[in-house]
Amino acid sequence: MEKDESKFFNILNNTIRSSSLEYNYDGNKVPMGFGINKSKTKIKIKKPYNNNLTFDIKTQIDAALEEVSEDYKDTNRIEEELELYIKDKLTHLCEKLKENKLDTLNLQRIYWAKNSSYNLSDDWLEGKYSKVNFNISVKVDINSSGVLKMRY
């Protein structure tokens, strides 16, 4: 895994605990740090259509900006940019796992739980999993900056 991929993997698996990431906000050369206070990811399968399997992955993140200057007062814009950034990272990671035939998100079990006629099998990675699609949505709420809570 690359440098920050383990953090994004932990976001997907609901195992991240008080972590921080860097992001180049608005194309700035100096990265902006943000802390992840809490993260919750839910994975559900959409009803199969024409033998296509799509998994909806919804992630909610409560975050804090670290060392915020006057340039970063527009938290709505920062939240939107972070959502796109994290969605891109999660999508890339899910595709990488699929490409390497690693079902570490236990998608086979989710599929099996919704399809009683399916038998858990070893052909999952070569068959259905190789054709899985991901529909990822991310919601970021910035609720603090530095050590002070923001008021809305």
Image (cartoon, rainbow, N blue to C red):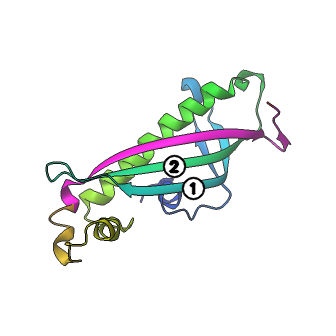
Residue 130 relative to residue 6: left or right: left
Indicate the quadrant where residue 111 lies.
Answer: bottom left
Real-space CA distance between mark 1 and mark 2, rounded to the nearest whole angstrom: 6 Å
Residue at 32% over, 59% down: 97
The x and y percentages for residue 121 are: 20, 77
Indicate the quadrant where residue 102 lies.
Answer: bottom left
Residue linked to disc 1: 40
In which quadrant is the C terminus drawn?
A: top right
In which quadrant is the N terminus drawn?
A: bottom left
Residue at 41% over, 45% down: 136
Q: Is residue 117 above or below residue 95?
A: below
Residue 65 relative to residue 42: left or right: right
Residue 141 relative to residue 1: left or right: right
Q: For numbered disc 1, what is the local secondary structure? A: strand
Which numbered disc flags the more N-terminal residue, 1 or 2?
A: 1
Name the amino acid, label 2. Thr
Tag 1–tag 2 contact (CB < 8 Å)? yes
Q: Quick one: 74 or 124, which is closer to the camera?
A: 124
Name the amino acid, label 1. Lys
Main secondary-structure element of the magenta-colored stretch: strand
The x and y percentages for residue 144 are: 77, 40
Give the residues in magenta.
Answer: 129-151
